[in-house]
Amino acid sequence: MVKLTPENPEARALEGLHLYHSARSNCSARVRLLLEEKGLAWTGHHLDLLKKENISAAYFGINPKGLVPALVHDGKVVIESNDILVYLEKQFLEPGFREVDDALQPQIDTWLRKSGELHIPAIKTFQYYKLNAAVLEKTPEEEERYWKLQKDPELLAFHGKHSGGKSFSEADAADAIALLTAVFEEMEQALQASPWLVGGRYSLADISWGPSITTVASGGFDFGPFPAIRRWYDALCRRPQFDRAVLEWRKQAQWEKLKKVKSSYADQTHG
Ligand SMILES: N[C@@H](CCC(=O)N[C@@H](CS)C(=O)NCC(=O)O)C(=O)O
């Protein structure tokens, strides 16, 4: 986890905790959830992804990948949502969400690592195939801005797949579903043995993965074969913190209802 001085002078001047985030973003939601759980005061800077508010030189001066979330704490920036969770956990000890036996700590780290590694190939690919590519289509002017600002090869390759009206292929979707199925099988096993992912206690692992379930469920992923995940997710949804940090924000951004969603996408979603 790296804490950097942002290029953007306005961000450098910020005091306290500032979160650059977006309503529907599962990566933003996991950070909002931890902030809620810890009862921390934070200032939000909401970026509307539909309006491509993340594609600006000013925002790339905060997160050089142009992604949400980015946390600015007293003028320094931390990016990568799972790194932000670990950062907040270290800075603000109480209440703690890594409180499991030392022997079980690596399991929390493994769930956080998987959450980060699977984001682009599994969660983001699935969701763009189902909905986002249609909703987040860039105008030629937005494309040009993006290709000038973005330097990250993985993101250039990812966004190249849906530029100019293209979309993700059936094969991309099948690969994403296979990755999701494999990780959900592991999760199902863990949750059949215990109410929470690690050590029987609500931890950063649950905070990281809960919002990802919200996202892929809205894309129509079938959780029928995963009863323990459904039970765990229902318990998460009953937490007022989850409601405030995740579900309430999504109500403000119901992309499925947008006219520009092609009927074939709308048919595939239920979120
Ligand atoms: N690995 C990053 C992924 C962040 C990410 O992909 N955020 C999405 C929203 S969930 C985003 O900013 N999408 C806009 C884009 O790809 O340009 C993290 O965990 O923070």
Image (cartoon, rainbow, N blue to C red):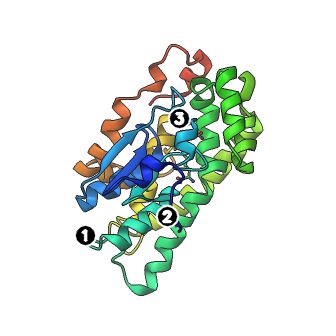
Disc 1 or 2, which lies upstream in sequence?
Answer: 2
Mark 3 = which residue?
Answer: 219
Residue drawn at (54%, 56%) of the image? 184
For this rendering, which residue is in front, 250 or 159?
159
Mark 1 = which residue?
Answer: 95
Q: Is mark 2 within 8 Å of ligand 1?
A: yes
Graded by Cα atoms within 10 Å as few (under 14), some (14 to 19) or many (20 or more), the crowding at tag 1 reads few
Identify whether 208 is placed above or below 49. Answer: below
Which quarter of the image is occupied by the C terminus? top left
Q: CA distance from mark 1 to mark 2?
A: 18 Å
For this rendering, which residue is in front, 107 or 20?
20
For this rendering, which residue is in front, 219 or 115?
115
Which quadrant of the figure has residue 137?
top right
Q: Is mark 1 within 8 Å of ligand 1?
A: no
Graded by Cα atoms within 10 Å as few (under 14), some (14 to 19) or many (20 or more), the crowding at tag 2 reads some
Mark 2 = which residue?
Answer: 83
Residue drawn at (30%, 70%) of the image? 92
Of circles 2 and 3, the one toward us is 2
For this rendering, which residue is in front, 137 or 104?
137
Residue drawn at (29%, 52%) of the image? 42
Q: CA distance from mark 2 to mark 3?
A: 26 Å
Identify whether 264 is placed above or below 32. Answer: above
Q: CA distance from mark 3 to mark 1?
A: 33 Å
Residue drawn at (63%, 29%) of the image? 133
Type of residue at label 2? Asp
Type of residue at label 3? Gly
Q: Secondary structure at mark 1?
A: loop
Is residue 33 visible in the rendered image? The answer is yes
